[in-house]
Image (tube, coloured by chain):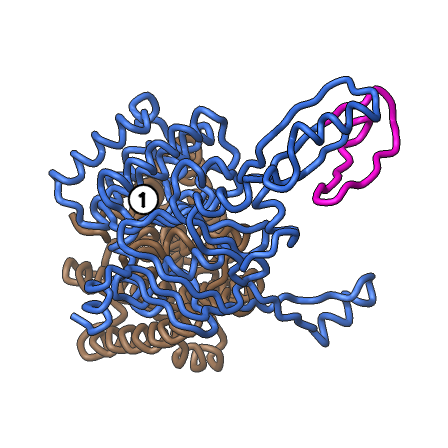
Chain colours: A brown, B blue
């Protein structure tokens, strides 16, 4: 087993150390999705569809976006915490890439969350809310590929936020701003079909719809053919661009490493 | 293979530090509410020098103690040596590597134990962290198992190796951390205050272990501590630094021979009485009716001194002590011993 997988496994095991946290995590994910769906059911007020968007499409949007969102949790404070308690010292002592070990730890957490939150939540939502099945069996694979790319984009954005800790020490405000922007513009809070037309045009030129909305549209069969290919390219380009920025910040930040507390 | 590596190999020098400097920017805040507000708009910084131009060389297989008062720059030096921090200037080379520049290749060759930090996974059993390190360092199965068996025995880990780290005592955690730093058989090990906060029994066990590591495996050791017994037991050479600069660099025996010739005569008088100073004797007030006389037995005869004191005063008790490394080091910090 290589070091990456070993890191991932360690994170996975650390997660399973607290059983009640696991159960409560599933509960909070379900509550979040059910509340969002309940609000939108009320807004629909018995209409089958509004502006060509059916309620079950909206429900599917929430189940997928918030379900994945509850699993795709990056700890924006990872680097800040390591700097403030000095544990970055022990990370730097290991002959592995610092950022890859962070990613491996994150993936361990995410796989754990996918298994204990996302998967059971989807089952529960299918039983009680009813979501739209994938447009076609052919849409499943493109959806997964797109979801992975969306994940990569979100990871690189979070890495940029984490790296700012080398300069501003407390990344809370940057992280909060990022979360608001990501939540609103990625389709996690408000399905992007309902954004004002002008804003939709703007969002198309940002990396945010790459995260959840593009994969969801693929799932619903709204994207196909050349457009599908364009979606992937867009996700990939944004990932490379943001990741390069994160790499640049890391190399600059590395020389500024400080160890607090003895 | 670099030229530097070959050179290091030929003359056996494994650590070479030359005029190393490291400064930190510390925010300096005026006092009071207005001061804090002003600081938001016009932040002021102060530059603190942690290490100022330290140079030394260490040969393969040496065991060296690095001591200094709190804030003297020991830990900063250790962290530059172990590739964590970037120095401001000066050169540093360990085992043919420049630690901060070639971090990933370099750290595979060293081990480091920081008494104040743990590299174990908090929520997992100790053995799981060891297993992670095995994969990180790509330790062959055979080496891993023989090392683990050896350290488990020497450091007596068997009773808690399957317990989560968060449930260990400090002494247990430290022994586990030492094992974690050594599983990949590093040839150079940095111990930064590994005995801090530990009881005498655990301390002794760690000292014995470090000695054997140096003696039997030929591991080069650099050790920082505030406990001088650690130094006496584990190190042959001593480097003291103060305010980021080197004060003394020589053998532990050398400094003992040079300064522990001095004797300390502790006298408890029956009542408080003025004592006249005497040439070649330093007087120290120990509180109450106790006084200490420090002198060199080559210049002042112990017998004469006692005779003189007992003739002039009523004495309840008298003891003669030899100065330990503790008091020598204290006086180096205080600047009352001039080091050449």
What is the number of callouts on the image? Answer: 1
- The percent coordinates of residue A222 (x first, y second) are 27, 69
Q: Decide which of B80, A91 is in the foreground and name it.
A: B80
* Residue B273 inside the magenta-drawn segment: yes
Residue found 28% across the figure and 43% down from its top: B182
Q: Decide which of B324, A88 is in the foreground and name it.
A: B324
- Quarter of image, res B261: top right
Give the main secondary structure, helix, strand or loop, of the magenta stretch.
loop
- Quarter of image, res A59: bottom left
Q: Decide which of B193, A124 is in the foreground and name it.
A: B193
Name above or below for residue A262 compared with residue B230: below
* Residue A224 inside the magenta-drawn segment: no
- The percent coordinates of residue B173 (x first, y second) are 41, 33
- Quarter of image, res B4: bottom left
Region of the chain picked out in magenta, as a range: B267-290
Q: Decide which of B4, B143 is in the foreground and name it.
A: B4
Residue found 38% across the figure and 33% down from its top: B206
In the image, farthest residue toward the top: B316
Residue A64 in view (yes/no): no
| Residue receiving disc 1 | B181
- The percent coordinates of residue B133 (x first, y second) are 26, 45
Residue found 43% across the figure and 53% down from its top: B250
Residue found 41% across the figure and 77% down from its top: A206
Mark 1 neighbour class, 10 Å CA radius: few under 14, some 14 to 19, many 20 or more: many
- The percent coordinates of residue A158 (x first, y second) are 42, 64
Residue B139 in view (yes/no): yes
Mark 1 falls on what kind of element?
Answer: helix
Name above or below for residue A105 compared with residue B36: above
């Amino acid at each position: 087993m290589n070091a990456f997988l070993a890191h991932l496994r360690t994170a996975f095991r650390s997660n399973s150390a607290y059983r009640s946290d696991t159960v409560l995590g599933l509960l909070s994910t379900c509550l979040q999705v059910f509340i969002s769906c309940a609000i939108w059911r009320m807004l629909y007020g018995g209409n089958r569809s509004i502006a060509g968007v059916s309620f079950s499409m909206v429900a599917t949007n929430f189940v997928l976006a918030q379900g994945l969102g509850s699993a795709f949790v990056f700890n924006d404070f990872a680097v800040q915490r390591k700097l403030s308690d000095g544990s970055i010292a022990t990370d730097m002592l290991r002959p592995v890439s610092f950022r890859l070990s962070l990613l491996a730890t994150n993936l361990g957490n995410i796989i754990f969350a996918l298994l204990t939150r996302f998967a059971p939540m989807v089952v529960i939502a299918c039983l009680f809310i009813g979501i739209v099945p994938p447009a076609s069996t052919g849409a499943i694979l493109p959806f997964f590929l797109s979801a992975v790319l969306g994940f990569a984009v979100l990871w690189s954005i979070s890495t940029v936020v984490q790296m700012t800790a080398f300069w501003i020490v407390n990344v809370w405000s940057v992280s909060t701003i990022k979360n608001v922007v990501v939540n609103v513009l990625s389709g996690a809070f408000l399905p992007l079909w309902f954004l004002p037309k002008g804003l939709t045009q703007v969002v198309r030129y940002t990396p945010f719809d790459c995260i959840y909305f593009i994969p969801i549209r693929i799932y619903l069969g709204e994207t196909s053919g050349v457009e599908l290919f364009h979606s992937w390219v867009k996700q990939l380009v944004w990932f490379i661009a943001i990741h390069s920025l994160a790499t640049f910040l890391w190399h600059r930040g590395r020389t500024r490493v400080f160890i607090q507390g003895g | 293979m670099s030229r530097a590596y070959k050179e290091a190999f030929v003359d056996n020098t494994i650590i070479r530090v030359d005029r190393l400097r490291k400064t930190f920017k510390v925010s300096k805040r005026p006092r009071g509410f207005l001061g804090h507000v002003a600081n938001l708009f016009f932040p002021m910084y102060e530059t603190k020098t942690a290490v100022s131009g330290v140079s030394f060389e260490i040969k393969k297989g040496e065991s060296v103690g690095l001591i200094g008062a709190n804030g003297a720059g020991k830990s900063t030096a250790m962290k530059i040596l172990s590739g964590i921090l970037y120095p401001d200037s000066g050169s540093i080379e360990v085992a043919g590597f420049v630690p901060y520049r070639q971090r990933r290749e370099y750290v595979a060759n060293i081990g480091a134990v920081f008494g104040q930090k743990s590299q174990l996974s908090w929520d997992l059993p100790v053995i799981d962290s060891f297993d992670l390190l095995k994969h990180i360092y790509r330790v062959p199965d055979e080496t891993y198992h023989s090392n683990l068996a050896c350290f488990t025995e020497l450091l007596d880990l068997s009773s808690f190796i399957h317990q989560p780290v968060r449930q260990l005592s400090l002494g247990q955690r430290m022994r586990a951390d030492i094992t974690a730093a050594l599983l990949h058989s590093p040839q150079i090990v940095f111990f930064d205050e590994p005995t801090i906060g530990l009881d005498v029994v655990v301390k002794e066990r760690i000292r014995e272990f470090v000695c054997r590591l140096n003696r039997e495996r030929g591991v080069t050791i650099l050790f920082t501590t505030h406990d001088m017994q650690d130094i006496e037991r584990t190190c042959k050479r001593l480097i003291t630094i103060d305010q980021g600069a080197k004060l003394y660099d020589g053998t532990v025996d050398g400094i003992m021979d040079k300064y522990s010739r001095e004797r300390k005569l502790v006298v408890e008088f029956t009542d408080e009485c003025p004592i006249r100073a005497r040439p070649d004797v330093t007087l120290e007030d120990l509180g109450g009716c106790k006084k200490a006389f420090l002198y060199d037995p080559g210049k002042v005869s112990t017998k004469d001194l006692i005779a003189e004191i007992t003739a002039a005063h009523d004495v309840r008790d008298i003891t003669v002590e030899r100065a330990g490394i503790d008091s020598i080091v204290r006086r180096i910090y205080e600047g009352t011993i001039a080091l050449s």
